[in-house]
Amino acid sequence: MAFVGSSCKRAFTLIELLVVIAIIAILAAILFPVFAKARERARGSACHSNIRQLGLAVSMYAADNERYPMHSSASTQFPRTRWADYIFPYVKSEALFSCPSATAPVLKKKWAHDQNRYYGGFGYNFQYLGNTRLQWAAGVTGIKAPAETIALADTTGVRRDDGTITAGEYIIDPPLSSARGSGNSAGYYGDGTEGGARYGERAWPVERHNGRVNVGFADGHSEAMTLSRMDDYNRDGKPDNGYWNGTADPNRL
């Protein structure tokens, strides 16, 4: 008896399928964090480029006006202008004013030139460069160490204890209340009711990019720094305003 030619295809068993699925899951668990870090590195590089250009714009504004921009116009003005509006003519790109990794809660400042569009994620060193509350802005000659004076940085604003953002999405505060003052009794951007026991009333720089804060300095250069480094100029383990106060003096408020 002759058999007609045929082939027999062997199917995977349940055990074999489970083994394949387990291998795929292990590979995914290994590779996903790698991909996430690579994506964040790319975003961090884009953010670094943005803040470098914004820092240069701040320095150009200061050179042209012989003083640094105010952090904001008076609250009675409409539409309100903020530091971003003042330096916008120097870059003419709205996209530069939003950190690629910033989340929605900080992307909520309206442009003066277009109230339907928003920006956020970068904060301005208002206590030492330009504070509308106190009607004061630093002159160019008043910033003695521009290469060591923070102008801009990634910000998460003022936060409640649960981490929600209440104010200051375009501002950064130094670690210690400045001698000049913030315009609030709390000594920081928050008014005493906007923060909490955990974070206080400080508008916080944030380590948004693989444990680093992108920082733009008053001379126009930029660096990626840890928050602890920003807040400790002389590296003695104690907070100081050396990188903030325009003089590179850690003993000066």
Image (cartoon, rainbow, N blue to C red):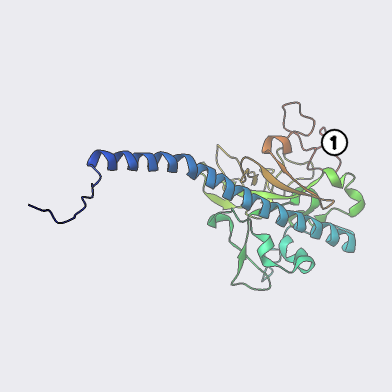
Local secondary structure at mark 1: loop
**Residue pointed to by mark 1:** 249
Residue 162 visible here: no
Q: Position of residue 74 (x, y in %)?
A: 71, 63
* Quadrant assignment for the C terminus: top right
Q: Is residue 214 left or right of residue 55?
A: left
Q: Nearer the viewer, residue 52 or 79?
A: 52
The residue carrying pointer 1 sits among few (fewer than 14), some (14 to 19) or many (20 or more) residues within 10 Å by Cα, namely some
Q: Residue furthest right?
A: 141
Q: Quadrant of residue 133?
A: bottom right
Q: Position of residue 140 (x, y in %)?
A: 89, 54
Q: Nearer the viewer, residue 150 or 6?
A: 6
Q: Residue furthest front?
A: 1
Q: Quadrant of residue 87?
A: bottom right
Q: Is residue 34 above or below residue 219?
A: above
The structure residue drawn at horizontal position 67% and vertical position 66%, both measured from the top left corner, is 94
Residue 164 visible here: yes
Q: Residue furthest top?
A: 236
The structure residue drawn at horizontal position 75% and vertical position 66%, both measured from the top left corner, is 88
Q: Position of residue 225 (x, y in %)?
A: 71, 40
Q: Amino acid at mark 1?
A: Asp
The structure residue drawn at horizontal position 85% and vertical position 60%, both measured from the top left corner, is 60
Q: Nearer the viewer, residue 190 or 242?
A: 242
The structure residue drawn at horizontal position 81% and vertical position 34%, both measured from the top left corner, is 250
